[in-house]
Image (spheres, rainbow, N blue to C red):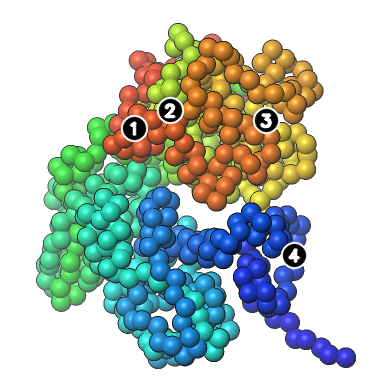
Amino acid sequence: MVVFKVAQIGKIAAGEVFGERALLTGEVRGATIVAEERSELLCIGGEALSEVLGGELRSCLEQNLVIQSLKKSPIISQFSTAQVISIMKTVVLTDFKPGQKVPAGLRFAVICDGDIKGMNKGQPMSLGSGGWFEQDTLLEDTPDTKAAPLRGNNKGNEDTKAEHLATLASSRGTLKELVAGDSGARIGCLTDAVLATVLKELGLESMGDAEQAIDYTRKMLLVQKVQLFRHLAKEACDKLVTSFVLEKFTKDQYVIKQGELGTKFFVIASGEVGVWIGEKFIRTMPRNQFFGERALLHDEPRTATVQVQTNDAELWSIDKDTFRAVMSAKMQTELQLRIRLQDTSVTMKDLKSVKVIGAGAAGTVRLVEHKKTSTRYALKRVMKNADGKIPEEVTRECALLGENDHPFIMQLVKTFETPKSVYMLTELITGGELHAAIRTIPTVLARKDCQFYGGSIILVLEELHERNIVYRDLKPENVMLDAQGYLKLIDFGIAKKLEEGKTRTFTMIGTPHYMAPEVMRGHGYGTGVDIWSFGVMVFEFVCGFLPFADDLDDPTEVCTAVLKDALSFPAGYKDQAGRTMMTGCLVRSPKNRLGAGMNGFEEIRTCEYFTSGHTDATVFSKILGRELDPPVQPKAEVYSEDVDDISLSDAGELG
């Protein structure tokens, strides 16, 4: 009897692929794949794939590997999907014989087949099929590089990306003596010169060479680490980054002094600085840290002194006047509000009740005001269960709101708990419900108006789905308007965050008219259900009624219509681009739905319906930058009616 020793070498997560090597080479399987839990795989045989792709099979598989690797690069992943695809097309696939030397100085390389060997920081290393490296520097080390091919997968971890970029320039050249392995290698190679050329072709003249691309990307990543700037549009971030001025300091030189009026925001490009409050030393701030962002928005004195500790230091700075020139007035107002909401030291005793602004089965909502700062909030009170425990849906909603930070999602400031109740302190949303607002427009929404509301919803869904959150109850009643008329998604009571590695949940929940077919079937569903609900909302916006069961109220009848009725548009709706987009969103098969492909939401962002009329910048960038006038601009604060006289039972619980 032969006994094989089995060792786990890794895990394959949702969205990843395996088995492509067997299709290309005909080799026997080199590993065993075991499902750790209930899983769903999409499979295709080699013959079927060859029939579809013909002689392009190898090329398509290699291109897919290259583009997926490029998207994991801390540098190249900062470009749009379309730009990454353009860069991918310039990657040269080259075959190397066993022992043949791999050229030094490659900006980016991905091993499509075989392996390479060499030295990394004086230690032997091996990089196998699917591995990649950038500028002669491995972006992710493992304890045993020989046993585990290295992959630089840092998507979604901006802090890690910034740290890797910080070492990129200083550790260049640590990969040495790279040669193809015993069976040779097929490598996709991208040089500095080629990258510089494609950047210019893409109109990115500000990044004239690869070194400038690294510098630009590092600044971009650092700007996105600043909470205030995290959700600025790409164009707005670009304006910030290109407006940075390099300032040089020497040891013991003051950068800012406590008490002086702040006028600049700083990012540490090199060196270290120390922070003092009065005579007390607080901490050292190294490279890639930042300070002073409040000075761009508020005329207030510095709260600390910052002094250079190393022999010299270089800081990137942007002053208040430049910042205000590149940010719209509406965006500045929004950022000022977000700064005020970040001050979470507020207690119940700091708040005074102004009036009740909402009441229902879920709880009572008050408008409250901070006694000292006059900042206004909404305070929602929910009764605990009879056993004194917080209702499960409230716990879930607080957890989801607490981990989200997006300009179009209601911001949770803090929660309070008393023996009888739980309180949610949130930002105050004053523009009323979207459902009511669109009914003030005398006709159905024109395309530009639907682009605004639909585009805002897509931005929110993209954020949620990136975090593996299924909203599950998308409808106009759950969307409100802020004071400027921009959207805010509220009510996360039935939203759910899928467990890591899982792509499906099974609970039948939601509002039937907006519910996706796969929810009703009960076989499991993922984030694609929100795309269906989005399609229903857009149809309602532009056609004036629901696409399915508009005249029905019985849940069973509604479900039957959603599952079986054909999608048809009114004769008066002539917008072919709109018809195409909505038809794509309202496909009953979730895997064929618009946005379900490899490029995800980019399929929706780049469809004709959203690109039409926006040549200088995308409608999504304009929405994030608050550069558009909303279709409905609230002229006064709007709250629920007839709630001022409600008798409240928790007066003794409030401070």
Q: Which residue is mark 3?
A: 515
Q: Secondary structure at mark 2?
A: helix
Q: Amino acid at mark 1?
A: His
In the image, what residue occupies the spot 52% across and 20% down?
Answer: 541
Residue 300 pos. (x, y %): 20, 43
Q: Amino acid at mark 3?
A: Met
47 sits left or right of 286 in the view:
right
* Observer-nearest of 323 and 114: 114
In the image, what residue occupies the spot 19% across and 72% down?
Answer: 309
**Cα distance in 3D space between marks 2 and 1:** 10 Å
**Cα distance in 3D space between marks 2 and 3:** 22 Å
> Is residue 437 in sight in this rendering?
yes
- State if disc 1 and disc 2 touch (CB < 8 Å): yes
**Cα distance in 3D space between marks 2 and 4:** 42 Å
**Cα distance in 3D space between marks 3 and 4:** 30 Å
- State if disc 4 and disc 3 touch (CB < 8 Å): no
- State if disc 1 and disc 4 touch (CB < 8 Å): no
158 sits left or right of 229 in the view:
right
Residue 467 pos. (x, y %): 54, 50
Q: Earlier in the sequence, mark 2 or mark 3?
A: 2
Q: Amino acid at mark 4?
A: Ala
Mark 3 residue crowding within 10 angstroms, few (<14) / some (14–19) / many (20+) = many
Q: Earlier in the sequence, mark 3 or mark 1?
A: 3
Residue 74 pos. (x, y %): 40, 63
**Cα distance in 3D space between marks 3 and 1:** 31 Å
Q: Secondary structure at mark 4?
A: loop
Q: Which residue is mark 2?
A: 451
Q: Which residue is mark 4?
A: 35
Q: Amino acid at mark 2?
A: Gln
Mark 3 vs mark 1: in front: 1
* Observer-nearest of 499 and 53: 53
Q: Classify residue 128 by image quadrant.
A: bottom right
